[in-house]
Amino acid sequence: MTTAMSRRGLLQGAVGVAAASGLAGCALGGGGTTEGVKGETSADNPLGVKADAALEVVIFNGGFGEDYAKAHQAMYRQRYPKAQIKHSATQQIAETLQPRFVAGDPPDVVNNSGGSQIDFNGLVAQGALTDLGELLDAPSLDDPAKKVRDALLPGIVDVGSYDGKFLSLNYAYSAYGIWYSRKLFESRGWEYPRTWTDMIALCRTIKAAGIAPWTYPGKHSRYLSWPILASAAKLGGLEVILAIDNLEPNAWKHPAVVAAAEAYYQLAVDGFLQPGAEGMDHVQSQTEWCRGNAAFLSCGSWLENEQKAVTPAGFRMAVAPTPALSNADKLPYETFRGTGSEPFIVPAQGKNTRGGLEYLRVMLSQAGAADFTRRVSSLTCVQGAGAGIPLGPGLTSVTELIDASKGGAFTWLYSSYYRKLERERVDGASAELFAKRINATQWCDKVQKSADEFAKDPAIKKYQRS
């Protein structure tokens, strides 16, 4: 599996400026260098882990749960049986850990994910993160002749890099697209539409059958901004996304973005969005979809695991790329948004940064990655680690999506560079768009105004993507 992208992505309430200012007391000066305890390096211990040093790991207890992390910690303990490991899991990462960063007493490894993650812009600006470059150049646990970086899927280093430093390991690999039930479609004789014209025609058929064509989480309307941007990139080319990531003037007013916004706004205008979706969160809308009350849903590949408790037997969820907006799209239909997600960091002021790096090396082994996939039905950033593992219908369709793209995956980084821009501004504007309080042109204008504010704010650190 390969990608042609240069973060999820990824992906995921922001603490924003409050985090940046709150971390001011622990500034380290860019790409932290605090070593903590250190042992002797050797062929078997290239990162110089002190064998009996305690390790503290904090996990975001979200869609993936925490059991996978406990398994990784057991693998670490096999290598360092004298090391005591303190494990904790929470959905309130920022609320729990921001005070510890300020006090200079953060954990050694943090799964900085979820709606309450600590804003990366603040962490990076204050030098609160260890540069993971040494991890990349360390030998892989599976093959000492092979560096860790060589075991990663393309794009993973780029998506976790800020100012040339690799600071965040996005461990899961997420594919984003439009989800549907193969069982429903086959029973009705429907085929997934490859063009937007066919999408609208099918939506009319679906609505006439008494099913809502689309549902979406109105409380997190950015979920529907994802296919807008994916469609815009496919229509106008990757330069559309680069301009957005680089906060260029009028990037959100590019004709391809306007055309994509108009296409998805049509879903609201024509009554193709499920009534009541405006007040739903992501779990509620996804559950409605699993119950067969809607045909289409925009989401990432964590969906199957997140909905496993309510997905009916035989539902056979599947994901597909966004339909082509025109016959002249610059990128093929099969192209999709794919990127690393579920970010892990090693705080620079952790007591055992050596152990933190080693913990990530264990995660990036074939055994560590395969165990994750078996437990949570998600691919990882490790090449080939999912081979031979029985996968559910959703994840099987993700592998089909990846294979069909022939390396044609891309992502945008503005949502990780400037998290509040997506989580607050794009999210809010999208809620208004799909509630028909503004139209597509006004959506583009509103988001562009917000992007301009970020670009002009001297307190916000800027990043350039090429």
Image (cartoon, rainbow, N blue to C red):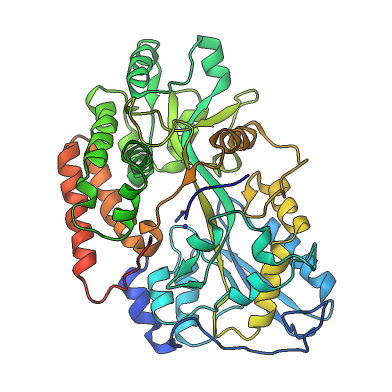
Residue 118 relative to residue 346: left or right:
left
Residue 117 relative to residue 136: left or right:
left
Image spot of residue 352 (x, y percent)? 66, 83
In the image, 414 versus 92, the foreground residue is 414
Image spot of residue 92 (x, y percent)? 48, 65
In the image, 20 versus 282, the foreground residue is 20
In the image, 92 versus 208, the foreground residue is 208
Residue 130 relative to residue 249: left or right:
right
| Residue 252 in view (yes/no) | yes
Quadrant assignment, res 369: bottom right
Name the residue: 77% across, 85% down: 41
In the image, 396 versus 91, the foreground residue is 396
Name above or below for residue 22 compared with residue 323: below
Name the residue: 71% across, 89% down: 38
Name above or below for residue 325 compared with residue 304: above
Name above or below for residue 351 compared with residue 160: below
Image spot of residue 99 (x, y percent)? 45, 80
| Residue 56 in view (yes/no) | no
User: Looking at the rendering, in which quadrant would you find the C terminus?
Assistant: bottom left
Image spot of residue 265 (x, y percent)? 25, 32
User: Looking at the rendering, in which quadrant would you find the N terminus?
Assistant: top right
Residue 340 relative to residue 437: left or right:
right
Quadrant assignment, res 229: top left
